[in-house]
Image (cartoon, coloured by chain):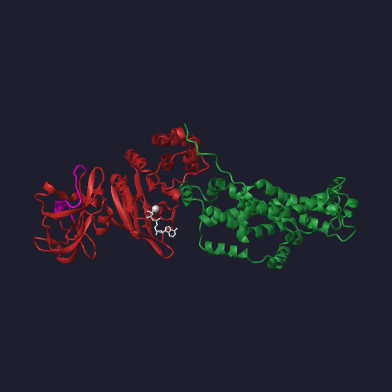
Amino acid sequence: MSIEPIGRRPRRVFNPTRIMIYCVLGVAAIYYLLPLYIMVMTSLKGMPEIRLGNIFSPPVEVTFEPWVKAWDTACTGLYCEGLKVGFWNSVKILIPSVVISIAIASVNGYALSFWRFRGAEVFFTILIFGSFIPYQVMLYPLVIITRELGIFGSITGIIMIHTIFGMPILTLLFRNYFASLPQELFKAARVDGAGFWGIFLKIMVPMSPPIFVVAIILQVTGIWNDFLFGVIFAGTKNFPMTVQLNNIVNSTQGVKEYNVNMAATILTGAVPLAIYFLSGKYFVRGIAAGAVKG
Amino acid sequence: MKSIEIKDLSLSFGDLKVLEQLNLDIFDGEFLVLLGASGCGKSTLLNCIAGLLDISEGQIFIKGNNVTWKEPKDRDIGMVFQSYALYPQMSVYGNLSFGLKNAGVPKAQIAERVARAAAILQIEPLLKRKPSELSGGQRQRVAIGRALVREVDVFLFDEPLSNLDAKLRAELRVEIKRLHQRLNNTMIYVTHDQIEALTLADRIAIMLGGSVQQLDTPHAIYNHPVNKYVAGFIGSPGMNFMKGALSGGDNPHFTIDGLNVDLSRYAFGEQGVQPTNSAWLGIRPEHVHVGKEADGLAFTHEVEVEVVEPMGADTLVWSQLANQEFRFRVGGQKTVTPGEKLIVGFDPISASVFDGHSELRL
Ligand SMILES: Nc1ncnc2c1ncn2[C@@H]1O[C@H](COP(=O)(O)OP(=O)(O)OP(=O)(O)O)[C@@H](O)[C@H]1O
Ligand SMILES: [Mg+2]
């Protein structure tokens, strides 16, 4: 027979600290959810209803017209093909940038923590130092460099820019992760005759899915949300979604279609949002890693 | 024949000199144990032999080949690490076969070699498991297996048993000894455990501060330590050291605070006896005789028991001899109480005398 504790386990749901915490969280949630609520409601209304000016009220007549328009026919500057063009441009920029930057940075981090070459520390310091220079400073020189390379205003150009700017934080991320793996594992693999790539691909990468997920989250959200590099380096034809969104929202011609603007904004934010929801705990680690950069 | 020759090996990490002008010759089929305090460079030396660290100066020969700049895989060595270092995402079979795959050994031969190693180490039922599903002792066997399948002449062990509990350690110790008798290859084994060192080794190298203090058989190291450091390092409980003066001549004496120890039966080294007023007399607690057994020994004296530490098989007694700490062992069956007076004595033939300054054996 087991010995029961005396009485029920006391539950204190409503102690003062708890109440405080829930109040603060509730207020914060309302603060952040209210704009989202307004956006969703507005995007589902027709223009006549919006002109009535009651932004908090739910739509009387629900319409998906603004969403279709935002995706398919809204005018972004000269063309009226909607956000879909920007979406596919962003995808075309995103996938190669994420893959290339993570591939290079993971090898960098691996080499820096296991194959310590002469000057490795200096190299690493320079790389990290680079991430503290405001990147606006580098814009003009980079414009000249990409122009000289003949890739200014092209998908290749913008991919290169994203890859370069992802390097410091990603290298730091991978270096720190690999440095936490046991050094003896590396030595064992060397005795077993594995080389630089063999150890990386067969031993280290299989041990590192978590850090790759963190890196992917960091890069996908960062690159998708980028505006400045896109508007400068991608070229008019290849403007990413964020730039096209801006063109829709800030167009000076005609009436302001608030419902279309709201729908377009939600569509643009959908990708990072989906990543946030799907990645759970990895996302938190990604933020923590990003926090190092500030 | 010599299996490994290390000539004037030096290694520094930046300004820190870890190994200095180290020389070591290891014979074919020998079991050599590297013993020393933490941080004295044992792992570093092993890593140099394995080729995992670039040395600063010197040469390393394995089987007569100069391997100083060769890659670890080309040195014909197998290594077992303290943390096992098993590849976590591979099965036991994958771990054992990884090195052979890298070397391009045909599949059938890999299977055969893995099966043979698994049979020797009795890990056949585990081949499909991941390292995380193994106990500490099983992991250690797999780690040894990974070296075994390479079928090399030289095995390097870096404290392979130090993560295991005492009982398992004793079991695996015997297994390693058995393995050595069966394979008869050269083994270099790092440990800080003296019992492991004394039981396994053909020869022991005692290291201090990056150089070898003494390289000899366990018997010689235990009975004829070359200096005070080695004498104090080997043996547990440690040797008693008493400071005193040494008088020379045909009838040498050691004087501790007015007490005379006749050393005429002590075998002095080649340099003979030089009188000095600063010397150490060392005697192991287990070489001290008590009561009747002390009758007729060259040195006897009465001491008062201060502290008693029963250790099962025997009992360690702490006392004072000529105002210096003096420990000795008595049989576990004997009852000894603090305050009791006992006659103790020893035969100087089992003692060690060291110079007071150089601390070398006289
Ligand atoms: N990578 C390194 N960089 C700098 N110093 C090091 C490095 N590796 C070891 N050392 C230093 O070299 C010395 C010898 O280290 P080593 O690991 O060989 O000691 P050890 O005898 O194996 O000790 P233990 O018994 O604790 O394993 C230590 O003082 C250590 O601090
Ligand atoms: Mg060590």
Residue B280 in sight here:
no
Q: Is residue A153 left or right of residue B282?
A: right
Residue A32 drawn at (x, y percent): 73, 54
The colour one sees for chain B in the rendered image is: red
Residue A291 drawn at (x, y percent): 62, 58
Quadrant of the picture in which ligand 1 is shown: bottom left
In which quadrant is the C terminus of chain B drawn?
bottom left
Q: Which residue, as the protein is rendered here, is positioned at the far front?
A: A7
Q: Give the range drawn in magenta.
A: B332-351
Q: In this view, does B250 lie to the left or right of B27?
A: left
Residue B120 drawn at (x, y percent): 39, 35
- Whether residue B336 appears in magenta in the rendering, the answer is yes
Q: How many marks?
A: 0
B5 up-or-down from B108: above or below: below
Residue A64 drawn at (x, y percent): 85, 46
- Whether residue B290 appears in magenta in the rendering, the answer is no
Q: Which of A222 and A281 lies nearest the eye of the viewer? A: A281
Question: Which of the 4 quarters of the picture holds residue A111?
Answer: bottom right
The colour one sees for chain A in the rendered image is: green
The residue lying at 69 percent from left, 53 percent from top is A221
Residue B337 in sight here:
yes
Q: Which of B269 and A172 lies nearest the eye of the viewer? A: A172
A157 up-or-down from B172: above or below: below
